[in-house]
Amino acid sequence: MNKPLKLLLVSTPVGPLGSGLGGGVELTVLNIATILRKRGYEITIVAPETSQLESFSVVEIPGELQILAQTKNRHDPVILPDNSVLTNLWNYAREVADQYDIIVNFAYDWLPLFLTPFFKGKLIHLVSMASLTDVMDRAVQEAIKHCPGSIAFHTHSQAETFGLKAGYFCLSNAIELSEYHFCKEPKNQLAWVGRISPEKGLEDAVIASARTGIPLLIMGKIQDENYWQKIIQNNSQAPIEYLGFLSTEKLQAKLGQCLALVMTHRWIEAFGNVAIEALACGVPVISYRRGGPTEIIRDGVTGWLVEPDNINQLVNAIQKIDKIDRLACRQQAEMEYSLDALGDRIEQWLLESTVNRQQPTFYDQFSRIKTRG
Ligand code: HBI
């Protein structure tokens, strides 16, 4: 029996796990850790102090949190605060590296990407957002050059924003499907879910709600208060209801009762977790044809893709939403976005990321997985 592979997962430096500051990455770390532990890997997670992650013990690292990358400008230099938790995380990873077979980075930051060749091909990265800054673009491209197979994205459209057409692994994403329940008969209402911030384009969904007269349930954290106030002032007649930032259990209960989820993002979504949460509840997705959702939604089968920023087309799609079979939406989620489906893709990535390394024991281990079938 081969010894189980040991993996070190290094989390985002923007906040402790469980704080919500890490956004979608927190759920991604939990889902990947859960499915790999279930498949016999030994998982250790290292993250900023006070992190908590369900049934996982976390190695907690002190230090100043990192600035959010999406607040940076494209040509900004790399900025590291004094006693940076990011540098402390990677000092720790260096100290323990010999105890692990693979180190997986989840931070969207220059430092770990730059360090890829320093870890002799053991370090791989899941890049969590589309291209935002020149320094990160270059660091991603250099990591691929030095260590082929070391970079994974959620979608091809996300990879394209880094100028990449090949040389990376496409992981998609997943959710714990057992937490989402199929709803056959929706109410006459629409859903919009996400951080309330300009790049998410909420105003278009609100206008579409006003034009169709169909109430819009809005769920998510208000990240930009001025932006939110402006939407309310400019659309006082729109039938909208703000429900706040909900737990997965409450979110899926509300989302499931909607005719459709409307996605109106201005930026290139790396993936669009809310789209697979909707599909899992049997809710069709109407989205701008932009970024990750274009690789999730089957146009005309599990939702509608419309011309970006075109509110008329949003309205047309809403008015023909009954052409979409809600069961087909749930079935797509079960086929492609279960933790098991993600587990297969992760193991494929781990295998491909090590194929360039001369470590025969590695191959034995993977051949065991491959033969398990
Ligand atoms: N910013 N600097 C930095 N590092 C991250 O890891 C990071 C971020 N902003 C947002 C973020 N991670 C996650 O919320 C998204 O990747 C989902």
Image (cartoon, rainbow, N blue to C red):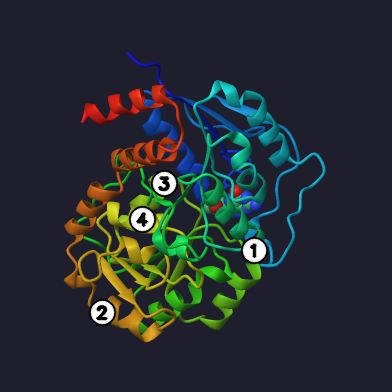
Q: Quadrant of residue 166?
A: bottom left
Distance between mark 4 and mark 1 Cα atoms:
40 Å
Whether tag 4 and tag 1 are in contact, CB under 8 A, the answer is no
Q: How many marks?
A: 4
Residue 64 image offset from top left, x and y in percent:
75, 42
Q: Depth check: give the residue in front, 160 or 267.
A: 160
- Could you tell whether 324 is left or right of 209 in the image? left
Q: Which residue is mark 2?
A: 319
Tell me if mark 1 has few (under 14), some (14-19) or many (20+) residues whose alpha carbon lies within 10 angstroms of its own.
some
Q: Amino acid at mark 2?
A: Gln
Residue underneath mark 1: 134
- Find out whether the residues at labels 3 and 4 contact each other: C-beta distance under 8 Å: no
Task: Report how far apart the C-alphas of labels 3 and 4 lie in the structure.
Answer: 10 Å
> In the picture provided, is 13 more to the left or to the right than 292?
right
Quarter of the image where the N terminus is located? top left
Q: Are marks 3 and 2 in contact (CB under 8 Å)?
A: no
Q: Which mark is residue 254?
A: 4
In the image, 283 versus 328, the foreground residue is 328
* Separation of residues labelled 2 and 1 (CA atoms): 42 Å
User: Who comes first in sequence, dot 3 or dot 1?
Assistant: 1
Label 4: which secondary element? helix
Q: Nearer the viewer, mark 4 or mark 1?
A: 1
**3 vs 4, front mark:** 3
Mark sitting earlier along the chain (2/1):
1
